[in-house]
Amino acid sequence: MLILLTNDDGIYAEGLSALFHELSKVAECIIVAPETEQSAVGHAITLYRPLRVRSARKGGSFLGHAVTGTPADCVKIGIKELTDRPVDLIISGINAGANVGFNMLYSGTVSAATEGAILGVPSMAISLDTRRGQSDFSYAARFSSRLVTYLIEKKAFAGLTLNVNIPSLPENGIKGIAVTKQGAARLVEVFEKRLDPRSNTYYWLAGETLFPEKESMESDAWALSKGYISITPIQHDLTCHTAIGEVRHSLKDFVL
């Protein structure tokens, strides 16, 4: 089995390194990741400049392929050009920070997994609910390896794309696993206005994730906040299937 690992925090990110360390024990892994951080780029792809790929090294040893592009770029070029045989599974992460609710739409981590699904490869996005500089990825990496091994043994990966969020808690503080749906948690944006040394105005986007007052108990954010590992099956089909009949009926008398 060949697993392609990527992320949006950059090829030298601690979460990616922890994931590679654990998954390499159970499968052959190749890293194809952005050369620099690409957080919150969503599903962007690079069209108007070349993608450059270099061999990244860590501690004197080959680490993986560093790409001057987005997470979705990494998945595309990794599958099409940088592997000598078909990729069996794509895993994106481990992201520093949860990807739940509407924030999934902005996430480069989640978009890398959905790009894998578009290309027909089972994929998984993995995130740890933590802040930068305060992250211990060891349990999240071990859990991810166990989950991958279990799903492979069950032959349950066909056609699946999973968004996995892990609480930043001690291992004995994790309450269990919850299969969830995307909730309505979202980032409440705050723009900090500043001046550069030449007195030019610039803005820095900040903010915190807001949980709705009545967030569903089946949602990803609710499960995560209660100490459960949230696993959400996701898809790239944006069609609102339940509204097709209503819209069709509303437009039946519309004349061009």
Image (spheres, helix red, strand yellow):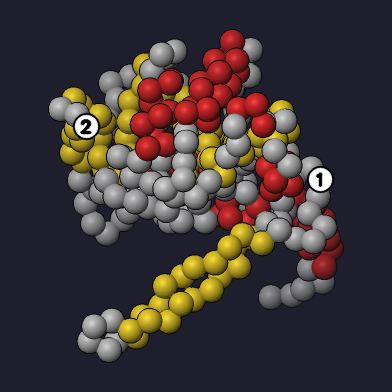
**Position in image of residue 49 (x %, y %):** 23, 57
Q: As displayed, is residue 73 above or below residue 151?
A: below
User: Which residue matches tag 2?
Assistant: 58
Residue placed most toward the observer, 256 or 228: 228
- The kind of residue tagged 1 is Met
Please report the residue visible at 57 percent of the width from the left and 48 percent of the height from the top: 99
Residue 31: name its quadrant.
Answer: top left
Mark 1 or mark 2, which has the lower sequence index?
Answer: 2
- The kind of residue tagged 2 is Lys
Please report the residue visible at 81 percent of the width from the left and 50 percent of the height from the top: 216
Measure the alpha-carbon separation of dots 1 and 2.
Answer: 43 Å
Can the viewer see residue 111 in this picture? no
**Position in image of residue 251 (x %, y %):** 78, 68
Name the secondary structure under disc 2. Answer: strand
Disc 2 crowd, CA 10 A, few/some/many (<14, 14-19, 20+): few
Residue placed most toward the observer, 196 or 220: 196
Please report the residue visible at 53 percent of the width from the left and 73 percent of the height from the top: 190
Name the secondary structure under disc 1. Answer: loop
Residue placed most toward the observer, 3 or 45: 3
Disc 1 crowd, CA 10 A, few/some/many (<14, 14-19, 20+): few
Label 1 with label 2: CB-CB less than 8 Å: no
Give the quadrant of the C terminus: bottom right
| Residue farthest to the bottom, as pictured | 199
Please report the residue visible at 53 percent of the width from the left and 30 percent of the height from the top: 140
User: Which residue matches tag 1?
Assistant: 217
Q: Along the horizontal axis of the image, is 250 left or right of 225? A: right
Residue 173: name its quadrant.
Answer: top right
**Position in image of residue 228 (x %, y %):** 70, 35
Give the quadrant of the N terminus: top left
